[in-house]
Image (tube, grey):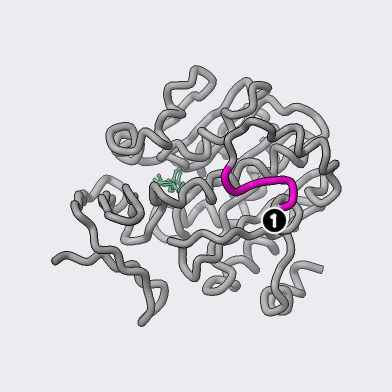
């Protein structure tokens, strides 16, 4: 009996007993696709779970809707770095006022496996508003002349090809390609296991952005079931939005995790997290 285990540190991890396993080495990473009894289809990169059919909605709703609903205006143009499974794009496309999404994914094999086996996220690729670029997001952001309302960094963990997406100069280049009231969000790892990484992310984003806030979500198949996102904003504060307007904005969006209360409560942090981040969160 084959068991897949993702180790969160030297001795503790998540083990899954798959029905089927498919694994290849792409040009950039080890790509594993599992079919499982309890969590459906699972995408794994470099032995780290990226998404499961059963709980991907949490991550994809939380990386997308918080930023979009922080604007007092209807936004038009979004850049997604990574996100080759299509889940984040699927959530952004739920807003009719979004005119254009650019998705920059370094590894075309991820998109191909998603289109073949994960229609629940990859259906986004059928939408005419979505334009896909197969290249390193680091280079794209350095060279593009485009301006975006929102940049979402839907990357894997800071090992392998995603490492460059956690660096200071990448954040500074993202600041430059955002419009004058733009908002940036990156997935920022587990507050239980990776507070040092989160501290660096916040510190580096604060060099450019006046508003930087951490928010979290409960994602069962991520380390400790507790995950974070870091939002950096040029103008708008996510905690100063009109709840009624937000509620109206998200009506009929088929959301299963994000809602008007979660928008605010996701920014509440436990004391041990606030304590460890106090010098960067002040
Ligand atoms: N959406 C997934 C989830 O639910 O957590 C997470 C991430 S998605 C699978 C991460 C993607 O980032 C992968 O497809 C990976 O190939 C891509 N990626 C990693 N480094 C990249 C880079 N430098 N530029 C563009 N894409 C990158």
Q: Give me the residue at 57% from left, 38% from top.
A: 141
Q: Position of residue 241 (x, y in %)?
A: 83, 44
How many discs mark residues in the rendered view?
A: 1
Q: Give me the residue at 46% from left, 29% from top.
A: 124
Question: Would residue 96 be found to the left or right of residue 11 on screen?
Answer: right
Q: Which portion, as a residue range, is magenta?
A: 256-261
Q: Position of residue 66 (x, y in %)?
A: 68, 45
Q: Residue furthest top?
A: 128
Is residue 35 visible in the rendered image? The answer is yes
Q: Give the overall secondary structure of the magenta segment.
A: loop
Q: Residue furthest bottom?
A: 11
Q: Quadrant of residue 111?
A: top left
Q: Position of residue 210 (x, y in %)?
A: 81, 52
Q: Which type of secondary structure does the marked residue at label 1 adopt?
A: helix
Q: Give me the residue at 67% from left, 58% from top.
A: 215
Is residue 45 visible in the rendered image? The answer is no
Q: Position of residue 202 (x, y in %)?
A: 68, 62
**In magenta segment, residue 97:** no
Residue picked out by circle 1 = 205
> Nearest the camera: 237 or 234?
237
Q: Does residue 68 lie above or below 281 as drawn?
A: above
Q: Quadrant of the N terminus?
A: bottom left
């Amino acid at each position: 009996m084959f068991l897949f285990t993702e180790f969160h540190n030297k001795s503790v991890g998540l083990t899954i007993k798959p029905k089927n396993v498919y694994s290849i080495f792409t040009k950039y990473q080890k790509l594993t696709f599992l079919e499982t009894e309890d969590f459906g289809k699972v995408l794994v990169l470099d032995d780290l779970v990226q998404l499961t059919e059963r709980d991907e909605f949490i991550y994809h709703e939380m990386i997308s809707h918080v930023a979009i609903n922080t604007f007092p205006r209807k936004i038009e143009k979004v850049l997604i770095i990574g996100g080759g499974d299509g889940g984040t794009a699927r959530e952004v496309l739920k807003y009719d006022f979004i005119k254009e999404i650019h998705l920059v994914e370094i590894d075309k094999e991820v998109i191909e496996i998603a289109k073949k086996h994960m229609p629940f996220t990859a259906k986004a690729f059928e939408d005419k508003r979505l334009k896909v670029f197969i290249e390193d997001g680091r280079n794209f952001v350095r060279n593009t002349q485009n301006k975006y309302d929102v940049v979402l960094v839907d990357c894997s963990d800071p090992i392998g090809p995603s490492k460059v997406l956690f660096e200071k100069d990448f954040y500074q280049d993202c600041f430059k390609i955002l419009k004058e009231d733009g908002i940036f969000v990156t997935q920022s790892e587990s507050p239980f296991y990776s507070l040092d990484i989160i501290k660096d992310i916040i510190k580096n984003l604060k060099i450019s952005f006046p508003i930087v806030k951490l928010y979290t979500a409960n994602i069962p198949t991520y380390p400790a079931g507790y995950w974070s996102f870091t939002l950096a904003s040029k103008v708008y504060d996510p905690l100063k939005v009109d709840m009624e307007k937000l509620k109206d904005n998200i009506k009929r969006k088929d959301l299963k995790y994000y809602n008007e209360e979660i928008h605010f409560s996701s920014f509440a942090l436990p004391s041990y997290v606030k304590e460890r981040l106090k010098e960067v969160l002040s």
